[in-house]
Image (tube, coloured by chain):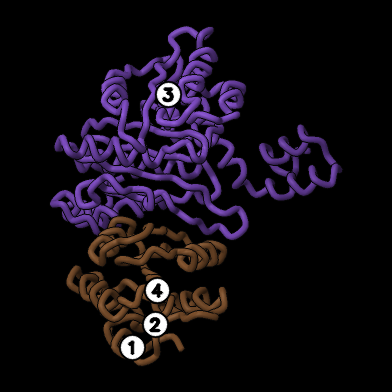
Chain colours: A brown, B purple
Amino acid sequence: MRIIIAKAGLDGHDRGAKIIARALRDGGHEVIYTGLRRTPQQIVSITRDEDASAIGISTLSGAHSRLLPMICKILKDADMDDIVVFAGGIIPDPDRDAIYSAGVRAIFGPGTSMTEPIRFLEEVQSRREDGKPAGVGEGGDWRWQ
Amino acid sequence: MAMKSSEPLFDAASNGDRRALAKLLTIAEEGGPLHAYDRKPSWILGITGPPGAGKSTLIDRLASNWSDKGEKIAILAVDPSSPVSGGALLGDRARMVFSDPSKIYFRSVSSRGSSGGISNGVRRMVEVLQSLGWDRILIETVGAGQGEFAIASVADRVMLVEGPDRGDILQAEKAGILEIADIIACNKSDLPGSQESVNSIKEGLSLSEGAPEVISVSALKGSGLDDLMESLDQITPNPDRLLMRSSMLLDSILADRMRRRPAYEDAMQALASRTIGPDEAADMVEFGNGRV
């Protein structure tokens, strides 16, 4: 799968993003890292230009409740409903429901094993093959638990 | 070959639909069926050089300057895939800070383990971009070995990017790749020792006839770019260099085809266990198991 790993907004810490990028590479995926401080619009444009099918957003700045739904909305407005969005970093439990309902399918917090995002993407793949919703705008309430 | 499937994508991409363009390039990369297009003349530059020489930053600067003049710029950045997992970490895009991503088209490409295989993919991607009227197409490859040169040789002009403090200028000389570039950009002119580095490259080339021009630039500070852009536009394809680069390109494609032959694995195993010699192993791949 071609996957974008993104850092959005004013967030200068990308150790986690780079670790997940490497883990996904070692899982056989083609990973494109955006670099720091991209806007939601830039992240969507990069996803479009790279013909990627998933975006992983690493967020440590506390702005997740604003940035993640914004990225999901821009994707849907651009008819990119099939793109799978997942997130990682520091996202407190009370904030998660709103983020899931915006279209994010998985949230990986601290302590996540390196293989978990890879298993998530395998599940995404098999859902796609079965014609079940997995993309940001495809509806349904499936989320990775 | 004329195929229906890519036509709607092509029409959409012609009208500026970037997603259609991206999907078209995926088909091209993977060798899928493409509708036959009329190619428009474009200016195609291959850029290679050792890791850390500043290729991505220099490309960012050049693309940004050309784009400001109203030219349509597309960049294909090829990075190696992991030999273990087949996956790839494509990070060149992270260095694009000067150019406006809404004007420039940037696409990361994984080498998928084979310079020969990806050369074909890159060639097809270039053809799609040409047919859609992109003015300048840049192909970036990492490294200064024959494989990287082979991919860059899909372009009709090649620039080698070097930097100061690089012990491998001598290596580049040994590999004979200094002479086959059309132009050499010696980057990081803002660092001490850069003039020495320019001198040593020029010295290395002093015995070759029609040697490529060496230009000193600093991608970081933006100095020397006007000279470089002028020289890039003045490159006239040199038949000897084109011939040498074509030979590398052909070699890499042939090597890729040989590796995909059914007897390759057996020949490699037999050679590793020293039950046969290198010549016999090569015969086995070329003619099949029966002929050894």
Amino acid residing under circle 4: Leu
SS at mark 3?
strand
Q: Residue at x 53, y 33 (%)?
A: B144
- For the residues labelled 2 and 1, the Cα–Cα distance comes to 7 Å
Q: Which residue is mark 2?
A: A91
Asked whether B242 or A3 is in front, the reply is: A3
- Where residue A8 appears, as percent x and y from the top left, is 32, 66
Q: Which residue is mark 4?
A: A60
Asked whether A69 or B253 is in front, the reply is: A69
- For the residues labelled 3 and 2, the Cα–Cα distance comes to 48 Å
Q: Residue at x 34, y 50 (%)?
A: B107
- For the residues labelled 4 and 1, the Cα–Cα distance comes to 14 Å
Q: Which residue is mark 1?
A: A95
Neighbor class of circle 1 (other Cα within 10 Å; few <14, some 14-19, many 20+) is: few
Instruction: Locate residue A44 relative to residue A145 in the image: left or right.
Output: left
Asked whether B259 or B21 is in front, the reply is: B21
Neighbor class of circle 4 (other Cα within 10 Å; few <14, some 14-19, many 20+) is: some
Q: Are marks 2 and 1 in contact (CB under 8 Å)?
A: yes
- For the residues labelled 3 and 1, the Cα–Cα distance comes to 53 Å
Counting residues from the N terminus, which is met first, the one under dot 4 or under dot 1? 4
Asked whether B274 or B196 is in front, the reply is: B196
Whether labels 4 and 1 belong to a single chain: the reply is yes
